[in-house]
Amino acid sequence: MKRTFVITVALIFGLGLLAGFGPFEKAAEAKTTFVTIGTGGITGVYYPTGGAIAKMVNKKRKEYGIRATVESTGGSVFNINAIMGGDLEFGVAQSDRQYQAVKGIEDWKDKGPQSDLRAVFSIHPETVDLIAGVDANINSIQDLKGKRVNIGNVGSGYRQNAIDALEASGLNFETDFNAESLKAAEAPGLIQDGRLDAAFYTVGHPSGYYKEATSGKRQVKFIPITNVDSLLEKYPYYAKAVTQVTTFYPTAANKEDVPTFGVKATFVTSAKVPDEVVYAIVKEVFDNFDDFVKLHPAYTGLTKESMLEGLSAPFHPGAVKYYKEVGLMK
Ligand code: GLU
């Protein structure tokens, strides 16, 4: 009994401190606003992207009182849900996933439209790619029948891209092959070990994922995804794309670049995140745009204007304030 009482008192006291009514109220009073950016697996481009954005704003920590940190996560769907649940303030998410969350479709069919989701800006293009061990004799999506294929973890953005690509080629992941639901970080090693025949992933380039997958003993190649017309007709967020395999992954078995389809990476937040915080982040990225684009080769070719395109959630008011100030928005 006594012990329970002591624990209860300790808990109440502890919670009081957390809530800011303890004796340390002054010290705990937010001089610094901590924000966390949800990204993806560490071999993707979201993780360094979160790092790049955090770096820009943390440089001005004294001025803004914002401290941004980055978290490796399961990807787009996880990030959007964690932002909506208040567990993350910001996240990187595929443009198709942003669209679906706003509309309340696909992974949000049961939850409905995520009306508090807000767009901040879009970032680099991402392509939907399929790689396979050369010895697995896979030359098209149809050849995946009966193989072991990673379609991605639930919570990732790319899982639905894989399912859509398969469907467009008349394949069903539940019946036509052994689908694995592994996180992106695990797949390259399993491809190299021969424990996976093929794997899908949607990412900007160059990425550590494909460098790792193509630089081991097993020869690995990118498989063209050409049955995309029905996808483009059906889904407004997909566009044709080419993966620059020869430029970025010279150790892959391909002699040419590979056609596929793609989306964009976007930076999102919640309507509940204060305007000043969103404003500060946007200002630091856009005022120092030349420094920002140097932080990852996937940002080559980005323009300030292009970073306001490909978004379906309403812009956060903190972002709108900056875009209007500099004339990027009327
Ligand atoms: N597009 C991937 C996803 O949302 C993540 C890519 C990355 O981490 O760069 O699942």
Image (spheres, rainbow, N blue to C red):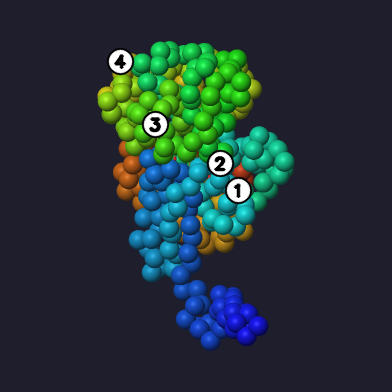
Report the residue marked by disc 3: 190
Element at badge 1? helix
Q: Are marks 4 and 1 in contact (CB under 8 Å)?
A: no
**Residue 157, numbered circle:** none
Q: Quadrant of the N terminus?
A: bottom right
The type of residue carrying mark 3 is Leu
The type of residue carrying mark 4 is Lys
Question: Is label 2 or label 3 in front?
Answer: 3
- Residue 206 appears in the figure: no
Element at badge 2? loop
Residue in the image at 36% along x and 33% along y: 189
Q: Quadrant of residue 13?
A: bottom right
Ligand 1 is within 8 Å of the C-beta of the residue at disc 4 = no
Is residue 37 rendered to the left or right of residue 217? right
As rendered, which of 26 and 124 lies closer to the eye?
Answer: 26
Using the numbered discs, state the Cα–Cα distance from disc 2 to disc 3 in whole angstroms. 20 Å
Query: Quick one: label 2, few (<14), some, or many (20+) residues within 10 Å?
Result: many
